[in-house]
């Protein structure tokens, strides 16, 4: 028997209303940690927040650069510099002299002899010139006091005469080559700290004693000589009428001619 129902199921598109398509399947979102905003679409961060973060980081970089600049800066906006160096070297002081071995031979009483020493200087700065004796036994025998430990009888005293000059300008003179004995005052000649001075007073009788006037250990001959200066040192020596021996040596004493820096004594210590 024929059925009123069709053999196949079908949809009558003409008479059936269209239904909306089902929503797409979406996997459930991962659970966010508490306190964090959900990630936005794309790179997971809001563009506004990205911009603010970039600006913050940039500001930190600028601040760090400013701090670094402040630490290394000279403290001025404009600076200028020039390189330099320091070098140092010693100068020189050279004294040239002629023969300094003075031989006063064949002396007779009352007749002095004068022997000259030529000198010249070569120096980086000005200099002073001195005659310097060594404080030893021969110096004591030449001009020491009678109670000196180096010589029992002291120096030549009234038996000898000594003088020294530089370019005919007297620096020291004495007719009593003996330092004053201990306890004797008021009879010494005037000699300053540079060994300049003395006394030209001579004996007028057997009992006359000129001022005690021993030869200084250091006698300043010239001051403030410029480089290239030259001249003569005139040394005078003789025996007086009190000397009677024709055999005994009169004197044998060592000395030096010394050039120093201006206002520096030859016995100055190095310090």
Image: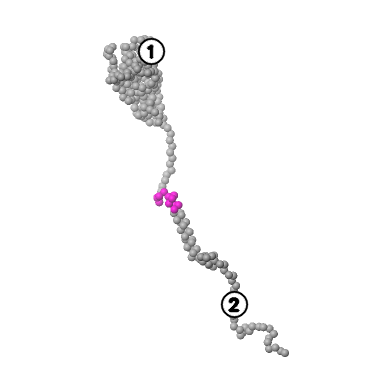
46 with respect to 169 (left or right): right
Quadrant showing the C terminus: top left
How many marks are shown on the rendered structure?
2
Circle nearer the N terminus (2, 1):
2
Q: Distance between the residues labelled 2 and 1?
A: 151 Å
The residues colored magenta run 67-77
Residue 173 is drawn in which quadrant? top left
Describe the element under mark 1 as helix, strand or loop.
Answer: loop
User: Which residue matches tag 2?
Assistant: 21
State yes or no: discs 2 and 1 in contact (Cβ < 8 Å).
no
Where residue 245 appears, x then y in whole percent?
35, 10
* Left or right: 12 as drawn, with respect to 238: right
Q: Quadrant of the N terminus?
A: bottom right
Residue in the foreground of this view, choosing between 262 and 229? 262
Q: Is residue 84 part of the magenta span, yes or no?
A: no
| 193 up-or-down from 146: above or below | below
* Circle 2 residues within 10 Å: few <14, some 14–19, many ≥20: few
Residue found at x 33% / y 25%: 194
Whether residue 69 is in magenta: the answer is yes
The image quarter in which residue 209 lies? top left
Residue in the picture at 45% in, 56% down = 63
- Residue 249 marker: 1
Residue located 31% across and 17% down the image: 176
Residue 114 seen: no
Percent position (x, y) of residue 172? 32, 21
Depicted 203 relative to depicted 129: above or below: above
């Amino acid at each position: 028997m024929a059925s009123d129902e069709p053999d196949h199921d079908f949809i009558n598109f003409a008479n059936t209303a269209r239904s909306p398509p089902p929503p797409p399947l979406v996997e459930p979102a991962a659970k966010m940690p508490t306190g964090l905003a959900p990630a936005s679409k794309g790179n997971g961060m809001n563009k506004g927040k990205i911009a603010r973060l970039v600006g913050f980081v940039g500001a930190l970089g600028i601040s760090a650069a400013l701090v670094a600049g402040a630490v290394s800066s000279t403290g001025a906006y404009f600076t200028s510099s020039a390189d330099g160096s320091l070098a140092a070297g010693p100068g020189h002081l050279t004294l040239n002299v002629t023969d300094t071995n003075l031989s006063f031979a064949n002396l007779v009483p009352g007749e002095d002899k004068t022997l000259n020493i030529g000198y010249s200087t070569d120096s980086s700065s000005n200099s002073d010139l001195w005659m310097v004796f060594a404080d030893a036994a021969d110096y004591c025998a030449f001009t020491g006091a009678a109670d000196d430990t180096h010589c029992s009888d002291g120096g030549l005293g009234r038996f000898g005469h000594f003088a020294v000059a530089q370019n005919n300008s007297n620096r020291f003179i004495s007719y009593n080559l003996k330092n004053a004995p201990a306890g004797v005052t008021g009879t010494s000649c005037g000699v300053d700290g540079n060994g300049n001075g003395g006394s030209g007073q001579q004996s007028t009788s057997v009992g006359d004693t000129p001022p005690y006037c021993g030869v200084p250990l250091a006698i300043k001959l010239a001051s403030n000589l410029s480089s290239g200066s030259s001249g003569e040192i005139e040394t005078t020596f003789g025996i007086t009428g009190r000397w009677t021996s024709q055999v005994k040596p009169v004197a044998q004493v060592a000395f030096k001619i010394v050039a120093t820096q201006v206002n520096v004594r030859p016995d100055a210590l190095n310090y």
